[in-house]
Amino acid sequence: MSDAQQVRSILITGGASGLGEAMARRFVRDGWAVIVADIDPARTEAVAAELGESAMPLTMDVTREEDWQRVREAVIGRFGHLDVLINNAGVAVGGTLEETSLDDWRWVLDIDLMGVVIGCKTFAPLMRERGRGHIINVASYAGFAAAPNINAYGTAKAGVIALSEMLRAELHEAGVNVSALCPAFVTTRLTETMRAPDEGYQKRVKRWMEKSGVSADDVAGVVRRAVDKPRFLLLTHRDTRWLWRFKRWAPELYFRTVMRQVRGMVERKVKGER
């Protein structure tokens, strides 16, 4: 069977919930074979069963190299190749540098950054050899924002963006596309495992998610279009598109704007406590 006749295949880590699940549903709807990879075996099986014969469930921990090798063998055995890899699995940590423990730093860096590194190292050689493919690494606008109180998470996501930029250059001549997806607040299950210095942090993040006006389905649509018409930086929220340009063109003014917002938040918090 020629490549043109083969079913297009996509592997989505963290594919059994939130943004990953939304992307899995979108690609299945468009006729793709979707490998739903997730650390939660029961949910992985349930989501794949609901998606039907086009979905293949695989339980994995993205921080374990042996899990990635097992997934690689399963994908090659089933499809012979992989068209698209979406490194989506992630966790969140809130807090300043001083508030965040080293254990929490290691936790978020291992999953959000090193999980992406291992995924790319596992599948990039296959795509290079084939001369086609697309790797989409899920970062966050937090990787650009330089905002306080998300030090560990923002650092991990900034690393994903930098990794993606360099990998894009390394794979370009081989015909392999690389994208960095940088959503802002989207309603997902991220806060369920989130680590933060106080309970109010999760509540604030949930509130911002609900008020964002952008859904996981909206982000999945951005990703789907980027696979058809590849581009590197995928900013999914209207305000982040101009904020990204603002920071690049006027970094000091951007910093002063961030600090005004921080002072405003502190003042509102103090008034609320009164």
Image (tube, rainbow, N blue to C red):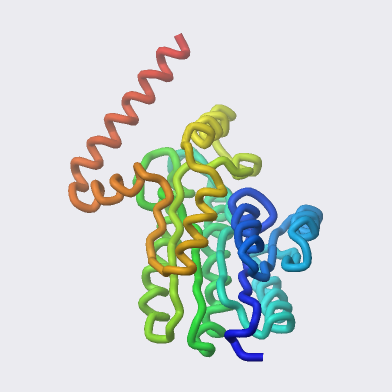
Work out whether 210 lies above or below 63. Answer: above
Q: Is residue 259 left or right of residue 57?
A: left
Please state the horizontal and vertical placement of residue 66, each as a whole percent of the image.
Answer: 69, 74
Displayed quadrant of residue 147: top left
Q: How far across and how far down the image is residue 78, in percent?
A: 73, 80
Residue beneath the point at 39% across and 66% down: 231
Quadrant of the drawing holding the C terminus? top left
Residue 82 in the image: state x and y as whole percent. 60, 78
Label count reads 0
Viewer-closest of 102 and 71: 71
- Can you say whether 4 is above or below 270 in the image? below
Does residue 116 sit above or below 109 in this rendering?
below
Question: Residue at 43% across / 83% down in the picture?
Answer: 175
Q: Quadrant of residue 6?
A: bottom right
Q: In the image shown, does 260 or 45 lie closer to the viewer? A: 45
The answer to whether residue 195 is visible is yes
Q: Vertically, is 246 above or below 256?
A: below
Q: Is residue 133 left or right of residue 251?
A: right
**Is the N terminus in the top left, top right, bottom left or bottom right quadrant?**
bottom right
